[in-house]
Image (cartoon, grey):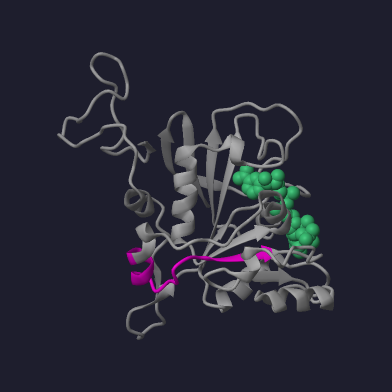
Amino acid sequence: MRRLFPVTDETAAPASDGVPGTETTNRAGTDTTDREWGLDELAEAYAYPPGQAGPAGAAGPAGPQPWLRANMVSTLDGAAQHDGRSQSISGAADMRIFGTLRGLADVVVVGAETVRQEGYRPARAREDFAARREAAGQGPAPAIAVVSASLDLDFSLPLFTSPLLPTLVLTGAAAAPDRIAAAEKAGARVVIAGDGMGVDPARAVRALVDLGMRRLLTEGGPRLLGQLVAAGVLDELCLTVSPMLTVGDAQRIAGGPPVAVPRKFELTSLLEEAGFLFSRYRRN
Ligand SMILES: NC(=O)c1ccc[n+]([C@@H]2O[C@H](COP(=O)([O-])OP(=O)(O)OC[C@H]3O[C@@H](n4cnc5c(N)ncnc54)[C@H](OP(=O)(O)O)[C@@H]3O)[C@@H](O)[C@H]2O)c1
C-alpha cells in the first residue's frame, strides 16, 4: 500500500528506471516501499478526529467529538453489490481497512437489509486493536446497531443472542410490540428513534451519542446511507473504488430521493493497493 494523497514521503516517486513501485527510498532516505501496511499503521491513518475541548474552565477534553463515517465499496461503474453482496467487489486490502474501521468504532450502524443479505454476525474483539481500544476507553469490540422498521429480523441469530456488547435495534415508536419484545428477549437493546414506523436518521445519531457512542461507523447499505446523507449527518465517507466493472443494475452506494443541493465533500486521504483506491472524504 502507498499513500497518494496527501503527498508525503510514503508517496513513492517514479524510479529512475521508470518502473513505479520498485524504489525503496526517497531522496530523504525514507522507506517508500510499496508494501502491505500493518493494522497499526492503518489505525493511525484512519483515526477519528481528536476530542473536543471541554467547556471553558473544564480540565481536559470532553471526549471524542461525535463523528459519523461511512465505509462503502463501489466498482468503477458504480455498483455497490454483485449478486446481492459486496464481498465479490472487495479485496484483501479493502477487508483490512474494513476491519480497521470497525476496530476504531464504538458502534457500527447498518440497515436491516444488509444484515439480512450479508448474514451479519457480532463484531469480534481483535487482539490487534485491544490496547488501542482500552486506551480510548472503548469496549473490546464495537456494538452493532441495526436500523429496521419492520423488525423482520431473525432474533435467534448470534448477532442478537451472543454479541460481546448487546446489539442495538433502532426503530420507530410504531414498531410492532411483539417484534420489539422478541428483540429484547433475544438480548437486543431496542432504541426508539422515530415517531412513526421508521427511524429519523438524525435522531438515531443523537440517540447513539446520548448512549456514549461518539465514534460512529455506518456500513450502509445504500438505502440507509442515502437517508444519512439527506439528513446532513454524514461527516465522512471512506470509499473504496474497486478496479472492476460489473454492468447490470446494482444499487449505487447511496440511494433514495435526490437531495436538493449536492452535498460537498473534500478529499483528505487517498491510498492505493493492487489497483484499489481507498479514498477518504470529509464534509466541507
Ligand atoms: N458496497 C457496499 O459498501 C455495501 C455496503 C452495505 C451493503 N451493501 C449491499 O447493499 C444491499 C443492501 O442495501 P439496501 O440499500 O437494500 O438496504 P439497507 O440500507 O442495508 O437496509 C434497508 C432496510 O433498513 C431499514 N431502514 C432503512 N432506513 C430506515 C429508516 N429510516 N427507518 C427504519 N428502518 C429503516 C429497513 O429495514 P426493514 O425492512 O427491516 O424495515 C430497510 O428495508 C446488499 O446487497 C448489500 O450487499 C453494499
One can see residue 223 in this view: no
Give the quadrant of residue 151.
bottom right
Residue 188 lies, with reference to residue 226, above or below; the image says below
In the displayed structure, does residue 24 sit left or right of residue 205?
left
**Is-magenta flag for residue 78?**
no
**Is-magenta flag for residue 136?**
yes
In the image as oriented, which residue stretches furthest toward the left? Answer: 29
Give the quadrant of residue 243.
top right
Image coords of residue 198 (percent x, y): 79, 67
Residue 227 lies, with reference to residue 95, above or below; the image says below
Image coords of residue 67 (percent x, y): 51, 63
Image coords of residue 253 (percent x, y): 66, 44
Image coords of residue 104 (percent x, y): 44, 60
In the displayed structure, does residue 80 sit left or right of residue 142?
right
Of residues 85 and 221, the one drawn nearer to the viewer in this rendering: 85
One can see residue 17 in this view: yes
Q: Which residues are magenta?
A: 131-146
Residue at the (33%, 79%) spot, across then down: 60
In the displayed structure, does residue 229 sit left or right of residue 154?
left
In the image as oriented, which residue stretches furthest toward the bottom? Answer: 57
Residue at the (25%, 20%) spot, across then down: 15
In the image as oriented, which residue stretches furthest toward the top? Answer: 17
In the displayed structure, does residue 241 sit left or right of residue 119?
left
Q: Give the mark count.
A: 0
Of residues 26 and 6, the one drawn nearer to the viewer in this rendering: 26
Of residues 139 and 157, the one drawn nearer to the viewer in this rendering: 157
Q: Quadrant of the N terminus?
A: top left
Residue at the (44%, 59%) spot, across then down: 103
Residue 85 lies, with reference to residue 131, above or below; the image says above
Residue 252 lies, with reference to residue 192, above or below; the image says above
Residue at the (38%, 67%) spot, across then down: 133
